[in-house]
Image (tube, rainbow, N blue to C red):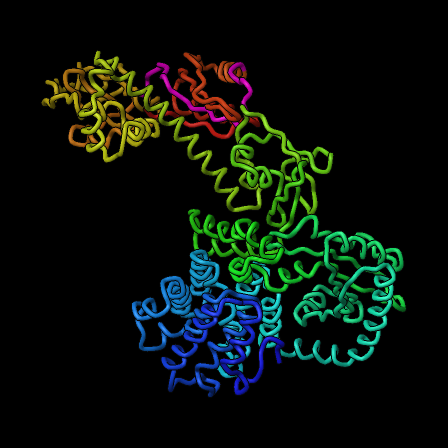
Amino acid sequence: MSSLSKPNEEITIDDIISKASAYIEDKEQIDIIEKAYLFAKKKHDGQYRKSGEAYIYHPMNVALILISVYADYETISAGLLHDVLEDCDCSSEEMEETFGSVITKLVQGVTKLSKINFSTENEYLIDYYKKIIVGMSEDVRVIIIKLADRLHNMRTLWAIPEDRQKVKAHEALEILAPIAHHLGIHKIKSELEDLSLRYLKPDVFYDIAEKLNKTKLERDKTVYDMQTEVTNLLTEHHIPHEIKGRAKSIYSIYNKLDRGKKFSDIYDLLALRILVNTEQECYLALGLIHSKFRPLPKRFKDYVAMPKPNMYQSLHTRVFGIDGYLFEIQIRTYDMDEVAENGIASHWAYKENGGSKVGANLQSTTEQKLQFFKSIIDLSHEKMSSEEFVNSVKDEVLNNNIYCFTPKGDVIELPRGATPIDFAYKIHTKVGETTVGAIVNNNIVPLNYELKDNDIVKINTNKSSTPSKEWIHMVKSTATRNKIKAFFTKNEREVYIERGKYSFEKELRKRKLSFSEFMTDENIQKICEAIKVEDLDDIYLNIGNGKTSATSVINVIDKIEETVAPKVVKVSSKSIDADIIVDGIDKVKVNLANCCNPVYGDSIIGYITKGNGITVHRINCHNLEMLEDRTLEVHWNDNTDKRYMTSLLIHTNDSENHMLDFVQTISAMNVSVDGIKTMSKGEKSIYEVVCYVTGLEQLEKLIMSIMKHNYIEKVEREFR
């Protein structure tokens, strides 16, 4: 039977009041707890659980679990009432009128979580993960009540069918126990794990339990002898203390066995916890123990000077003790022990009663602890699928993280497998974006170096540097990955806007239109409505990325009237020596469209213009969407020997100037260059190259030659 419970028939409201009064001194608050019990008892009257007991015993057990972790009176009251809204004839209005808004909101939060129908089906389970984790952010006490609720349900899991037992156990082990761990509630976390193992792998659970029982007498004697030795040592040096033997949980033993260890090799089955009054006495006790018992190398951890994010503080060491047995020893103050056992759940109770040092510590560091929940909300806001979200939560928030340090000693929590880039972005997005190198433990390391616990990391930055797309595949944190992706989305948007503005202004000059007179607020609004965008930047963006053309945008305001096709004379096409042939038509002006710059070999189509003959476009030109009514078939004259202008966009992955390389490569292909300019600068550059080719075959060979340079990301033909 759990140390947190007693048989239901023995539980009374007096037990609850007595245990709560041990740390809640306000009589009015105790009265509210009793009032909640009486209200819940009346509402649940006549209801029974599947185990056969009266339903009221469930919320009473939940209240006792909450009291065991020093929850405040509002949390305990909500624990007693947590099923009333869902299972009884009671409205939120009635509850708020009786108990106020805070307790009612806590009950509503638990009710919302309880309405989810759990299932072992993957998608359903994923949806459950997402809702329960995001839901707890509204008030951390909601999830603490949910943890207590699930713990009592796990204690009575025998009352439901075996298949449902495994589903519940899996949920508890995968999600709820790790959350209890991050809240620092060791009591709930440990029991949830043991109970989950009992139902998921009963053979393993009972095998370990049996082995523990068989070795109990021998272990108890060894622990007693060691305890006596340590007590005499500390007393001799006038250090007031208390020593407890510490039981290893069955689940933690299972984990070690699962990693290949033998039962006889699990040395921390023998464990002591030493409680002292001050931090100084923690270190004095440690020194005395190490002076008498040889410590195991590299097994000392100082969580006093460097607390865990869940506020856990303790000194951990392993020593060769009595008869050569290995002992795991934890040394901490009484206040630290309170936090280690009860975690954040006790914050509100201490806050209300002022007083103790632990209360002050909890108050001052609560914001840091709640960063855990903020991390989850940040993840839920990222654009990712449910499965990605759950994997991210399990990998980055709930799994064992690593703790690295800045050169100033600040602790940075990261997912295991994180790199210096993750570290840099965790400090600040701007630090991440300008990272150029990293020094770990005074050694220069590559940016894909996998950081380890206790690494001291110095990030070198350059304010003119920007991220590399390769980083997306180097980082571990989903949040970091999304920040890098967001940078490139924004950066590419800026490039497209700049390109679109250039094309737009060029078309205005070609039509001899004044920019300031043309781009009035009224005209901008008309254009936005016509092409369904929000503002001027979006207009430029659509032009720059090829979704629309500068010509069609200007035509919204400065519309060219449509006319009938020019008069043509039908003749034999064989007599034509032009580069474009329009079957049956002679003596008509033919132009190549400068929005898509077709070259010999491209699939093409003609468009009948007003007074300017026929303009020839590539068949995939975006401007054709608006020109379908006045198009006609055209094709290339195979006898032509002309050269055709084309415009290429060359994307590089560095900031070096490669113009000379491009000129040499292009000239070697017998292609003449008309101009090169840089469209974007930074860690990566985009070049626009205008050149003349004999046709599509030569153009494709040219692109392949340019692509051979290792700094090239891609080469594309430009649409304007």
Q: How many marks?
A: 0
Left or right: 208 with respect to 590?
right
To which quarter of the image does residue 492 belong? Answer: top left
Q: Position of residue 343 (x, y in %)?
A: 59, 60
- In magenta stretch: residue 187: no
Question: Magenta residues, as a range?
Answer: 638-660
User: The C terminus lies in which quarter of the figure?
Assistant: top left
Q: Which residue sits at x=27%, y=26%?
A: 549
Between residue 45 and residue 217, name the one nearer to us: 45
Q: Height in image: 181 above or below 6?
A: above
Between residue 169 and residue 236, name the one nearer to us: 236
Q: Height in image: 615 above or below 221?
A: above
- In magenta stretch: residue 643: yes
User: The N terminus lies in which quarter of the figure?
Assistant: bottom right
To which quarter of the image does residue 463 belong? Answer: top right
Left or right: 76 with respect to 330?
left
Residue 36 seen = yes
Q: Which residue sits at x=36%, y=65%?
A: 100
Residue 119 seen = no
Left or right: 442 with respect to 600?
right
To which quarter of the image does residue 19 belong? Answer: bottom right
Q: Position of residue 109 (x, y in %)?
A: 40, 63
Q: Position of residue 608 (x, y in %)?
A: 17, 23
Q: Position of residue 556 (x, y in %)?
A: 18, 26
Between residue 401 and residue 594, name the one nearer to us: 401
Q: Which residue sits at x=88%, y=58%?
A: 294
Q: Height in image: 314 above or below 618?
A: below
